[in-house]
């Protein structure tokens, strides 16, 4: 199995990077859409439109991309022996935390679609920075491999 994965290593890497880009784009878009939904009146047509958009974002981009990132990433880690490297453990922790953030944002978006406002607009704007900070740290870990 590992020999086959090594043969397709660059395809795995390309797939991983492609879906990381999609996932990160979705993670940046969801809180922004939630800000717009926050401004609309609960039960209004505008709120329904934003709820539909965020639902499509979750179903078409966010969740499928996150799953693909995990599948490609774990195959890459297995084929390259990354599980034995310290930088990978730190990256894996950040990706686990980012996946938790994904789930938390999806849960809040679903609440908002029901007319609830679990997070303030200011909080949504602040948490929108989480994926960017995570991306910076992950890229540094993968490229520099500090430990």
Image (cartoon, rainbow, N blue to C red):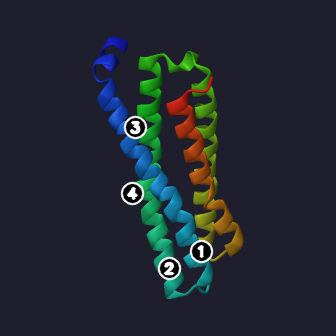
Residue denoted by label 1: 35
Which quadrant holds the C terminus? top right
Viewer-closest of 144 and 61? 144
Nearer the observer: mark 1 or 2; the answer is 1
Viewer-closest of 133 and 57? 133
Viewer-closest of 95 and 37? 95
Residue denoted by label 2: 48
Of labels 1 and 2, earlier in sequence is 1
Q: Is residue 119 visible?
A: no
In the image, residue 25 lies at what x, y percent?
A: 45, 57
Image vertical order of residue 85 relative to residue 144, above or below: above
Compute the Cα span from label 3 to label 2.
Answer: 33 Å
Image vertical order of residue 133 relative to residue 75, above or below: below
Residue denoted by label 3: 16
Residues at badges 4 and 2 in contact (C-beta under 8 Å)? Answer: no
Q: Please name the residue shown 60% across and 26% down the image.
A: 87
Residues at badges 1 and 2 in contact (C-beta under 8 Å)? Answer: no
In the image, residue 5 lies at what x, y percent?
A: 34, 19
Of labels 4 and 1, earlier in sequence is 1
The local secondary structure at tag 2 comes to: helix
Of labels 3 and 2, earlier in sequence is 3
Nearer the observer: mark 4 or 1; the answer is 1
Q: Please name the residue shown 44% across and 45% down the image.
A: 20
Compute the Cα span from label 3 to label 4.
Answer: 17 Å
The local secondary structure at tag 3 comes to: helix
Compute the Cα span from label 4 to label 1.
Answer: 20 Å
Compute the Cα span from label 4 to label 2.
Answer: 18 Å
Residue denoted by label 4: 60
């Amino acid at each position: 199995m590992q020999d086959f994965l090594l043969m397709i290593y660059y395809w795995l890497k390309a797939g991983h990077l492609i879906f990381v880009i999609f996932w990160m784009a979705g993670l940046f878009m969801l809180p922004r859409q939630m800000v717009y939904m926050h401004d609309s009146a609960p039960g209004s047509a505008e709120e329904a439109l934003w709820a539909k958009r965020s639902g499509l974002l979750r179903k078409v981009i966010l969740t499928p991309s996150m799953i693909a990132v995990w599948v490609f990433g774990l195959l890459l880690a297995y084929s390259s022996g990354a599980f034995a490297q310290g930088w990978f453990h730190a990256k894996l922790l950040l990706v686990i935390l980012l996946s938790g953030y994904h789930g938390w944002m999806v849960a809040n978006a679903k609440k908002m679609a029901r007319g609830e406002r679990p997070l303030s607009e200011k909080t949504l704007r602040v948490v929108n920075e989480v994926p960017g900070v995570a991306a910076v740290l992950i890229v540094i870990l993968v490229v520099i491999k500090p430990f």
